[in-house]
Amino acid sequence: MWRLLFLLALLLPDLPLDPFHGGLAASLWHPLGVDELGRDALLRLLLAGARSVGFASACALLALGLALLLAWRGRRWRGALSALRSLPPVLFLLPLAAALGGIGVAALLLLLGLLLAPHLEPPLRGKLETFRRSPAWAAERTLGATPASTLRRWAPWALDQAAVLFPSAWLGALWGEATLSTLGLGPGPSHDSLGRLLLEQLPRLATDPSPLGWGALVVVLGLAWSASGSAAPKHG
């Protein structure tokens, strides 16, 4: 789970600003140039990419934890969960973000996790229902095992089942953050990310061949391709 390593990127400090030496073109020392605030564009791309991956990993973990809880105890909310699954999470977030003038990092992580969880719940529920009808579950109840001991014994198995869905949840979180940030409705300038880079650089690509803009676009598409490729066999 290489994506989990990028959780540490959420704690990295921002690059130092040096506006007096900003706007430099690409060179040997600065392969992608220097942005208007004096930050090396390559370092900024690497930091923004690591933060976006770390954000997606944290959001995916939250969504999977909530999905497991819903699959185990969410029978009474099946109707509401079905309604939430009818539209992609971003379509719920867009009008909310527009009304609020943007959504901060913590709020976006929580909201995306809550909206992704109903989409992950059905496959997990199918696995858990099969387990509940198994002789192993019947033996647990017959022998009078406490809920705590059952959880301790079977939690690793449940987490292993949830881990199969991690790439899908990760891709949904990455796409949601990048979409909102690209539209100017995500976290503010204090949180640099691939979506923030695209918001700044995409309008320039038609007239100015910005290496940073093309680099950010290539990284986003590459991450989306790698995640979708790794997730596809899991759902087969």
Image (tube, rainbow, N blue to C red):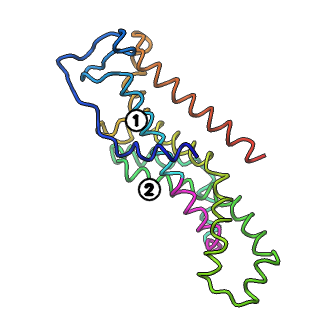
Horizontal side of residue 138 vs 216, given as left or right: right
Rendered residue at 35%/42% (across/down) = 187
Q: Quick one: 127 or 155, which is closer to the camera?
A: 155
Q: Residue furthest left?
A: 20
Residue 171 included in the magenta stretch of the image: no
Residue 74 forms part of the magenta stretch: yes
When the figure is inspected, residue 54 is found, relative to residue 76, above or below; the finding is: above
Q: Is disc 2 placed on a helix, strand or loop?
A: helix
Kind of residue indicated by mark 1: Ser
Name the residue: 52% across, 23% down: 218
Circles 2 and 1, Cβ within 8 Å, touching? The answer is: no
Mark 2 packing: few (<14 Cα in 10 Å), some, or many (20+)?
some
**Residue type highlighted by circle 2:** Leu
- The segment highlighted magenta reads 61-76
Q: Residue at x 65, y 67 (%)?
A: 71
User: Which residue is at the far right?
Assistant: 135
Q: N-terminal of the two: label 2 or label 1? A: 2
Q: Quadrant of residue 40?
A: top left
* Residue 27 point in image, percent of width and height: 35, 9
Q: Secondary structure at mark 1?
A: loop
**Residue named by callout 1:** 193
Q: Nearer the viewer, mark 2 or mark 1?
A: 1
In this view, the residue in front, 180 or 174, is 174
Tell me residue 198's x, y (percent): 42, 27
